[in-house]
Image (cartoon, rainbow, N blue to C red):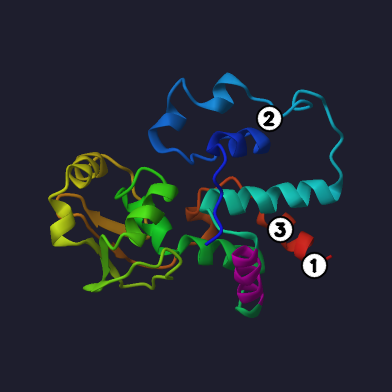
Amino acid sequence: MARYIESTCRLCRREGIKLFLKGDRCYSSKCAVTKRSYAPGEHGQSRKKVSEYGLQLREKQKARRIYGVLERQFSNYFTRAERMRGVTGENLLVLLERRLDNIVYRLGFADSRAEARILVRHGHFLVNGRKVSIPSYLVRPGDVIAVREKSKESPRFKELAAAAAHRNLPAWLQAEAASLEGRVLALPTREQIDVPVQEHLIVELYSR
């Protein structure tokens, strides 16, 4: 499976904003964007005029990197969003939010989406009582996501349970931190998705 193996912090610096890809580190003084707010590389500090295409491309890359999906995966999500009823850009973000790794992160059962992907792949989570080890699995309203009983005894999940108790949840999710169990109440609206992405630019890019 293809995956990104370079420095994660370079991705945030390239986009010029915090993408919160490394959990607690992103909130500390060690954050690379805080220390060096310019793009990586030899010419990172030079000012460049960005074209309309460049702006559209940056928004697409930003969304891909936030949710941790590959180019082909992202293109497939866009194709599916186009076929759905409603606004294509909003449909795209809703599909990305429905990924199991994102739900695990949103519920506070992982510090970052990257950690959530690893935990899901290792089989630590159940969806409606059945083990699911596919990070891209799309949840539906009413689905119950829970940590397996065996996994709850691990020190890492005990840390996460303590932290999840103080986490602010989006209105479309419900969680019981003590039992490490959550429920999808509804699909999110655009107003409930707090990612710094201008989805209309992504639609314009794919419409070229």
Identify the residue at image location x=14%, y=50%.
178
For label 2, count other residues whose C-alpha is less than 10 Å away and answer few (under 14), some (14-19) or many (20+).
some
Circle 1 is placed at which residue position? 207
For label 3, count other residues whose C-alpha is less than 10 Å away and answer few (under 14), some (14-19) or many (20+).
many
Counting residues from the N terminus, which is met first, the one under dot 2 or under dot 3? 2
The mark found on residue 40 in the picture is: 2
Q: CA distance from mark 2 to mark 1?
A: 30 Å
Q: Which residues are magenta?
A: 72-82
Identify the residue at image location x=24%, y=43%.
160
Compared to residue 14, the image places residue 110 above or below, namely below
Which quadrant of the view contains residue 14? Answer: top right
Mark 2 lies on a secondary structure that is loop
Three-letter amino acid code of the residue under disc 2: Pro
Compared to residue 83, the image places residue 132 above or below, namely above
Mark 1 lies on a secondary structure that is loop
The mark found on residue 202 in the picture is: 3
Compared to residue 202, the image places residue 167 above or below, namely above
Q: Position of residue 54 (x, y in %)?
A: 81, 47
The answer to whether residue 87 is visible is no
